[in-house]
Amino acid sequence: MAVNKWAESARPCQAVFLFRYNVIRITTRFIFGPQNSIVFRIAFAMEQEFQLMIENLKTCPCTSGKAYNKCCGPFLERHATPRTVKQLMRSRYTAFALGGHGGYLLDTWHPSQSVGLTAESLSLKATQWLGLKILDFSQQGDAGMVEFEASYSDKEGNKGVHHEKSQFVREGGKWLYLRHEA
Ligand SMILES: [Zn+2]
């Protein structure tokens, strides 16, 4: 699994914030009383800021080093559509890694190749995906390819690496996963 330098650099900042937040929170509760003090309101606002920061600190499972809401999140939450095969590949990996996104996997799977698959079965998280490494990619017109390695840990805790060359096709302006090379 690639070391997430971005998250590492954010950690001290998070620690400072936590310290500041806790000092104000404890002071508020034990000295000023819990309600209606301006200090309490400040602490509450800081708590919200902290929650937001935690959300932003959650790094994307695709190991891009970016925050989830700035990487695959908008695709999985349907706020945006992948414009490149790499974006689609990453977002599909993240859907598998998180679990519960079978609908997205089915929607980005070419219908000719997804016969028999259901959103429910694709939402199950049988394998723990540990990281993604894109080795090569190409995109020409409405055809694309991404070669990658995905490391995983199975139910028994055995670790391995899945190597694949995925083929993609663009239909109606939307990239779809077609198949992988044998
Ligand atoms: Zn991502």
Image (cartoon, helix red, strand yellow):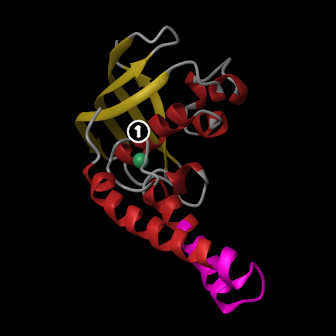
- Is residue 152 located in the magenta-colored stretch of the structure? no
Q: Which residue lies furthest to the front in this view?
A: 31
Q: Residue at x 64, y 33 (%)?
A: 102
Quarter of the picture containing the C terminus is top left
Q: Residue at x 59, y 61 (%)?
A: 79
Left or right: 59, with 22 as reference point: left
Q: Residue at x 37, y 50 (%)?
A: 84
Q: Residue at x 44, y 58 (%)?
A: 57
Left or right: 67, with 45 as reference point: left
* Image quarter of residue 124: top right
Residue 32, given in percent of the width and then of the height, sits at 69, 85
Between 52 and 136, the one nearer to me in the picture: 52
Q: Is the CB of the residue bearing disc 1 within 8 angstroms of ligand 1?
A: no
User: Callout 1, which amino acid?
Assistant: Met
Residue 92, given in percent of the width and then of the height, sits at 48, 37
Residue 3, given in percent of the width and then of the height, sits at 26, 41
Categorize mark 1 by other alpha carbons within 10 Å: few (<14), some (14-19), many (20+).
many
Q: What stretch is highlighted in magenta?
A: 28-50
Q: What element carries label 1?
A: helix
Residue 157, given in percent of the width and then of the height, sits at 45, 12
Left or right: 107, with 9 as reference point: right
The mark total stands at 1
Quarter of the picture containing the N terminus is top left
- Main structural element of the magenta stretch: helix, strand or loop? helix
Between 29 and 88, the one nearer to me in the picture: 29
Q: Residue furthest bottom?
A: 38
In the image, residue 113 sits, relative to residue 96, either above or below, namely above
* Image quarter of residue 45: bottom right
- Is residue 44 located in the magenta-colored stretch of the structure? yes
Between 28 and 94, the one nearer to me in the picture: 28
In the image, residue 76 sits, relative to residue 163, either above or below, namely below
Residue that numbered label 1 is attached to: 89
